[in-house]
Amino acid sequence: MVDHFWLSEAIRVSRLAPAVPDRYAVGAVIVGGDGALLSTGYTGETHPHHHAEEEALARLADRPDLDLSGATLYTSLEPCTTRRSRPATCTRLILDAGIGRVVLAWREPILFADCDGVETLRRHGVDVLEVPDMADQVRAVNSHVLRPTAAHLEIIG
C-alpha cells in the first residue's frame, strides 16, 4: 500500500531527529499528487524549535507556484495545534500551504500540549487518514519522551 510506504519513510526520517526530553522526534514527507517525493523534514533539522512538518514545508518555499492541493503530507505524529516556540502551528502551516491530504501514524498524546490537529484539519476540508497499526513504531522512536527520567519529570513538572 502506498500510504504505508510513505508513512514508513516519515518514520524512518523521524529517527534522524535528536532525542531531546522535551520534544517528540517526528518525521514528515510531502508527496505530490503524481506520487513524486517533494520534500522531507524532521524535528530540529535546521533549528531546535522547528517541527518536522515545518521543515518539510520550508523546503518548498522557493516554489510558490507549486499547487499542493493534490499533495499528501505523511507525518509520524499528529500535526500540532498549540505551540509556544513559534508563531504558527504545523496545522496552520499545512492549511496555508493548501495541502489536501494528511496521513499520520499516531495522535499526539497529552504530554506537552492538548492537540486537536486531526479535527482541525478535517474541519477545514483536509482529508486525514490515521494508520494506527504503525503507531508502535512512532512510540518506539519517542521512547526518550515516553519513558520518564528525572530530567523529563523536571521539564513537565
Image (spheres, rainbow, N blue to C red):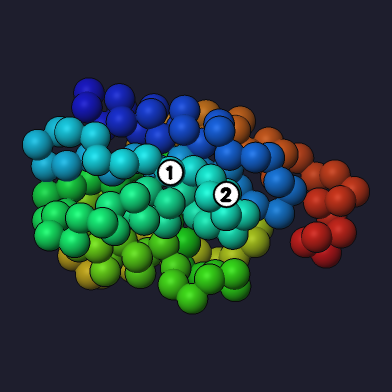
Using a 10 Å C-alpha cutoff, classify the residue at mark 2 as few (fewer than 14 neighbours), some (14 to 19) or many (20 or more).
many
Residue at image location 38% in from the left, 29% down from the top: 9
Image spot of residue 155 (x, y percent)? 80, 60
Identify residue for label 2.
44
Q: Which residue occupies the foreground of this view, 1 or 85? A: 85
Q: Left or right: 96 with respect to 67?
A: right
Q: Residue at x 34, y 50 (%)?
A: 59
Amino acid, disc 2: Gly
Does the CB distance between marks 2 and 1 fall below 8 Å?
Answer: no
Above or below for 19 versus 15? below
Residue 98 placement (x, y as % from top left): 20, 62
Label 1 amino acid? Answer: Gly
Q: Relative to 81, does residue 66 appear above or below in the rendering?
A: above
Q: Position of residue 115 (x, y in %)?
A: 50, 64
Q: Position of residue 153 (x, y in %)?
A: 84, 55
Of helix, strand and loop, which one carries label 2? loop
Q: Residue furthest bottom?
A: 87
Would residue 77 be visible to someone looking at this image? no
99 left or right of 34 in image: right
Q: In the visual, does 125 lie left or right of 132?
A: left
Q: Can I make out residue 67 in this image?
A: yes
